[in-house]
Amino acid sequence: MRLIAAHDPTPDATLRLDNHDDVLARADAVRSAAVVELQFPKWTDGRAYSQAVLLRGRLRYTGEIHAIGEVLVDMLPLLRRCGFDAVRLRADQDAETARRTLSFLPDHYQRDPAAQRGAPTAA
């Protein structure tokens, strides 16, 4: 998982979805996007996790999924597990702590949506 700096530009062909958008209804737009940004307006609102699982699982989306908004370091393992490729942390979150957090559990025993796009999983 990659950390996106606050000043990094948004890539071309990016589709930004609100956390209340129906991902399946936007399938055509999703398929033409190189990057899909999913928003966390509050860190306690987990709808973007479900959106990511739908993107990877049902739509077989192979592009990048970015988490933006109220993204905390504590959320990173689950974000990765749900199929996110990159995150833009909330301004008060420490990037070094995020890197350490991501290194703790590199693999999972059960299959996940990331496996749908060919990512390695534990045997």
Image (tube, rainbow, N blue to C red):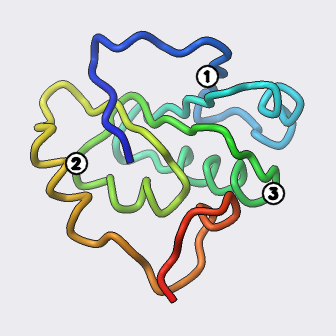
Residue 97 in the image: state x and y as whole percent: 11, 48
Between the residue at mark 3 and the residue at mark 1, the CA separation in whole angstroms equals 19 Å
| Residue shown at 51% from the left, 89% from the top | 123
In this picture, residue 92 sits left or right of residue 118? left
Residue 35 in the image: state x and y as whole percent: 62, 28
SS at circle 2: helix
Residue 109 in the image: state x and y as whole percent: 47, 86
Per the image, the residue denoted by label 1 is 16
Per the image, the residue denoted by label 3 is 58
Residue 56 quadrant: bottom right
Question: Badges 3 and 1: C-beta atoms under 8 Å apart?
Answer: no
Answer few, some or many: residues within 10 Å of disc 1's Cα (few below 14, many 20 plus, some between 14 and 19): some
| Residue shown at 22% from the left, 48% from the top | 73
Per the image, the residue denoted by label 2 is 73
Taking depth in this image into account, of 94 and 99 the one nearest to the observer is 99
Q: Is residue 112 above or below residue 62?
A: below
* Amino acid identity at mark 2: Val
| Residue shown at 61% from the left, 12% from the top | 12
Residue 94 in the image: state x and y as whole percent: 11, 38
Q: Say whether disc 1 or disc 2 marks the residue closer to the N-terminus.
A: 1
Between the residue at mark 1 and the residue at mark 2, the CA separation in whole angstroms equals 21 Å
Q: Say whether disc 3 or disc 1 marks the residue closer to the N-terminus.
A: 1
SS at circle 1: strand
| Residue shown at 32% from the left, 53% from the top | 76
* Amino acid identity at mark 1: Arg
Residue 58 quadrant: bottom right
